[in-house]
Image (spheres, coloured by chain):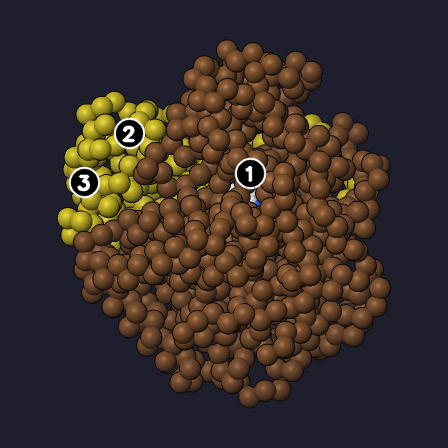
Chain colours: A yellow, B brown
Amino acid sequence: MKVRFKIWRQDSPIDKGSFKVYEVDGLNPDMSFLEALDHLNEKLVLRNEKVIAFDHDCREGICGQCGVFINGRAHGPHENTTTCQLHMRSFEEGKVIVVEPWRAKAFPVIKDLIVDRSAFDRIIEHGGYISAKTGTASEANAIPVGKDIAERVMDVAACIGCGACVATCKNSSAALFTSAKINHLNSLPQGKPEEHQRVLDMTAQMAKEDFGHCTFTGACEVECPEGISINNIAEMNARFLKAKLFR
Amino acid sequence: MKLNAKIPEGKLEEKWRNYQLKSKLINPANKKKLNVIVVGSGLSGAGAAATLAELGYNVQCFCYQDSARRAHSVAAQGGINAAKNYQHDGDSVWRMFHDTLKGGDFRSREANTYRLAELSAPLIDHFTQQGVPFAREYGGVLANRSFGGVQVQRTFYARGQTGQQLLLAAYSQLYKMIRAKKVTMFPRTEMLDLVVIDGRAKGIIIRDLVSGEIKRYVADAVVLATGGYSRVFRLSTLAIGCNGSAIWKAHKKGAFFAAPSFTQIHPTALPQSSETQSKLTLMSESLRNDGRIWVPKKKEDTRKANDIPEEERDYYLERRYPSFGNLAPRDIASRAAKERIDNGHGVGRFRNAVYLDFKHAIERLGLETIKDRYGNLFKMYKKITGVDAYKEPMQISPAAHFSMGGLWVDYELMTTIPGLYAIGECNFSDHGANRLGANSLLQASLDGYFILPNTINNYLASEENRAPVDTNHPAFVDAEKKIKGDIEHILSINGNQTVDHFHRELGKVMWQNCAMSRNQAGLESAIEQIKKIKKAFWQEVKITGHSQELNTELEKALRLADFIELALLMCTDALQRDESCGAHFREEYQTKDGEAWRRDKEYTYVSAWEYTKDYFKLHKEELDFEFVKPTVRSYK
Ligand SMILES: Cc1cc2nc3c(=O)[nH]c(=O)nc-3n(C[C@H](O)[C@H](O)[C@H](O)COP(=O)(O)OP(=O)(O)OC[C@H]3O[C@@H](n4cnc5c(N)ncnc54)[C@H](O)[C@@H]3O)c2cc1C
Ligand code: FES
């Protein structure tokens, strides 16, 4: 299989960057997209060129480290998948595949396709936890949690923190990411004692970073590898109002 | 040097308490002055860093990913064991201890294994408190499922994403302590060497993976929590960046390496489908709860799975191991698959797989139940293979998965270098020669949250009054100089082969000779081949770019250089152990019906290897079975 990659190259955060075109031969349809990039990188080394830097680790859709824009879509042509789970069989022979990094002010480019997503960590730092020390827990079954609640919590807790929601949003909003963590913890009895402070702190941090406002376009839930629903943002907003009123 | 495991006095069930009663304490005002380095942010590292910080120590935590949340613990699917006996099916701490000891084929310490079982129940309480959405029953209580090698249901899970949920909980606790200014986090940072001063671990040398800068960090104790090293096989279920470098460098600085060759080959991964493949994807073992494994009775059968009638299918695990059937432990299930594949019964395009079939489960339980239990795994299978496993069986194949081996540690989790600890998958502690499914999230978490924070005081109490060292100490300067030299050297080779080329070569040699079954001639030839790969690597590797920038080829090359050396030790270890036990299967030592022949009289010890300039020197920690008599491990 043969394709033509058009890939964003940027040597450093201060470099301007530009697209470069690479003809790549010798691929097979069962290769993953990242394996195709590996293959190209090996060719580049042998041609004495610098390899294309891209982020990845688990290569099974769970660590959230991979993520690039492919032909204008976060994580490529399929809905609800990660870049590492994409295979070359999803592309047509001989076609151009345009590959760019996440584009968002809060996610500055470090090199080529790699961006800095540490803003997400800082949002978690501001309340995305339950303040309980190791060694203080009581018997797990002492607090029952309904199966429906546990399932709903799992739906949002599944967020892998890849940043596709931000990258695909025309406002670069981190509302889906932030709401997923807030709704996870605030829906559980264990998270209740800090529920109001958590919403206020996490949303305040979100505002401090360079993310935009959510205007409910719904683009995020389409690209989210875990299919986290946009309803979570509405729920977060309701929790925010409640926190403002009742804290 | 005589190895002292420091096992506390007393009855098995009193040892941990006795230990805690006697260990030294440090007053809170002094804890504030003590610094601990934790390398790794997986379940063990993040758990340790957060808990040590809660106790008052200053912690510096390092990981190579862009965020602590991405450590490979995130990828564990199936679950975590605990002897809660919620199912009322006869489980107990003793039974779990016994299952684990037997599962490990009596090659681990009784005291450690017992502690693992003993602390398992409170760990579930702990994670529930942190907000882990474990699966629940309709009545609101926690649910369980079974896992291989066990006849009770003691596995807790969060859909097929248990590792992710546990890790995110640990990560959130870590960030809680970062906010409290007790932990400093260094993502995109790789440890390249350990610094030992006057025989004690005092710091590390790292490379900032973004700027390429080499830096020194000093502390009163160093904790390695760097995970498994099965990427030495290249194709494995581990993440691409997983490496053995940190523990290998520690080994070269004096930490003994225990049972390096004990590697778990997981029976249910997706088969390799091309030469360029970069990793193998695991399908959770929990699938074996309801799926049935079979191959066609006829050799080289080219019919489609669904066209092969029932009487022409060989459910070989049920046939060979009637009492455990499809839930036989991993080493046994993998070897049985290999036996069928090698004998021409393999299926799939490359004839390297076996079937995992849900037809009967769907008939018995209904499609909805199967969807509820495994929906996300079936979805993942479809994404990767394009096949709908509700309609035809999955194809699965064995893959390198877990390192039972690792740095030798005593009961306190300290290595043979005072002040250097190893926790989680990177140590050799509780799993013996084979780990039971769902026991390693448990071990990693316990090491980090419950055990290390209780044992490290014992050492740090003696460091309280020692004169502090700083990073200008010659040991730091020399270590940094050496690393810089190595990096410039590797970049200057400018040969004609890529790093991946050598990694593929190494992987092939290791997979053929040091994986599911091993023999003397194979291992001897592997050692020769690896030496050749090493030589070629240092003459012919080509890396583009330079050292003062983000350079992913350089990262890979440095990791591979260590893997090559580690591979030599693994083969040496496998060659030395003239017996079969657990995952270590030496073809020369098998029973008439092809089962492992353990030689207790000669080999009831842990092999702990010392690095010397010219060879690997063996030390033995004799294993004393005081409470359980080792028996022949049978799952028939
Ligand atoms: C696919 C898969 C599924 C699994 N499923 C299960 C399961 O269902 N149940 C179960 O009990 N176990 C399971 N396991 C095993 C279990 O997940 C691991 O053994 C466990 O999570 C290891 O945790 P850890 O903290 O030791 O290491 P990891 O989580 O791997 O963390 C290692 C950390 O070390 C850092 N690091 C590594 N090298 C360096 C370096 N040189 N410099 C700086 N930092 C470094 C990494 O960045 C990372 O933060 C599974 C394993 C895999 C691969
Ligand atoms: S590499 Fe981990 S999600 Fe893609």
At 77% from the left and 70% from the top, the residue drawn is B8
The amino acid marked with disc number 1 is Ser
x, y (%) of residue A85? Answer: 41, 33
The amino acid marked with disc number 3 is Phe
Which of pointers 2 and 1 indicates the residue nearer the eye? 1
Callout 3: SS? strand
The amino acid marked with disc number 2 is Asn
First-in-chain label (3 vs 2): 3
Nearer to us in this view, B18 or A193: B18
Residue B89 can be seen in this image: yes
Q: Which chain carries label 2?
A: A
Q: In which quarter of the image is residue B262?
A: bottom right
Q: In which quarter of the image is residue B297?
A: top right
**Label 2, on which residue?**
A28
Which of pointers 3 and 1 indicates the residue nearer the eye? 1
B628 left or right of B177? right
- Residue A19 marker: 3
Q: Quadrant of residue B210?
A: bottom left
Find the distance from the CA under tag 2 to the CA under tag 1. Answer: 29 Å
**Label 1, on which residue?**
B334
At 31% from the left and 27% from the top, the residue drawn is A29
Find the distance from the CA under tag 3 to the CA under tag 2. Answer: 24 Å
